[in-house]
Amino acid sequence: VQLQASGGGLVQAGGSLRLSCAASGRTFSSYDMGWFRQAPGKERDFVAAVNWSGNNIYYLDSVKGRFTISRDNAKNTVYLQMNSLKPEDTAVYYCAAKPARGRYYSDYVDPGRYAYWGQGTLVTVSS
């Protein structure tokens, strides 16, 4: 599966952005989807994930209540709505896909579990 992320940009603190990740292929609904981010000089960190059906959702603690992940299997797209953005949210955001399996948080937060990655989209939050 090929992934194309978009929607990044420059926003002031407190603002909002909506990231999209469009997937190619006809088997999108057989993949769990995740969003990760990588700030300069730091490792790639888990942000949010949604299972293949959309019924199970997981978040990094620091984004709970501010970010919302969702997916539309009919459109082969996963979204990340980001509200109340903070300067510390500044990073390149990547979407990723892994074969649908696992029922626990630990199954979704490890970037090594994901087989496919998008190219990344830069989010910059100014103070």
Image (cartoon, rainbow, N blue to C red):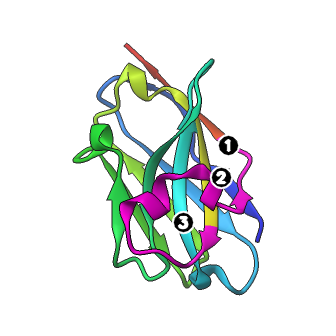
103 inside magenta stretch: yes
Q: Position of residue 45 (x, y in %)?
A: 51, 39
The N terminus is located in which quarter? bottom right
Q: What secondary structure is found at the residue carrying circle 2?
A: strand
User: Taking 98 as reference, is 56 left or right?
Assistant: left
The C terminus is located in which quarter? top left
Q: CA distance from mark 2 to mark 1?
A: 6 Å
Q: Amino acid at mark 3?
A: Met
Q: Are marks 2 and 1 in contact (CB under 8 Å)?
A: yes
Q: Which tag, 3 or 2, sits closer to the chain's start?
A: 2
Classify mark 2: residues with Cα within 10 Å, few (<14), some (14-19) or many (20+).
Answer: many
Disc sitting over residue 90 in the figure: none
Residue position marked by numbered label 3 in the rendering: 33
Outermost top residue: 127
Q: Nearer the viewer, mark 1 or mark 3?
A: 3
Q: Amino acid at mark 2?
A: Ala
Q: CA distance from mark 3 to mark 2?
A: 12 Å
48 inside magenta stretch: no
Residue position marked by numbered label 1 in the rendering: 120
Q: Which tag, 2 or 1, sits closer to the chain's start?
A: 2
Per the rendered image, the range of residues in magenta is: 98-120
Classify mark 1: residues with Cα within 10 Å, few (<14), some (14-19) or many (20+).
Answer: many
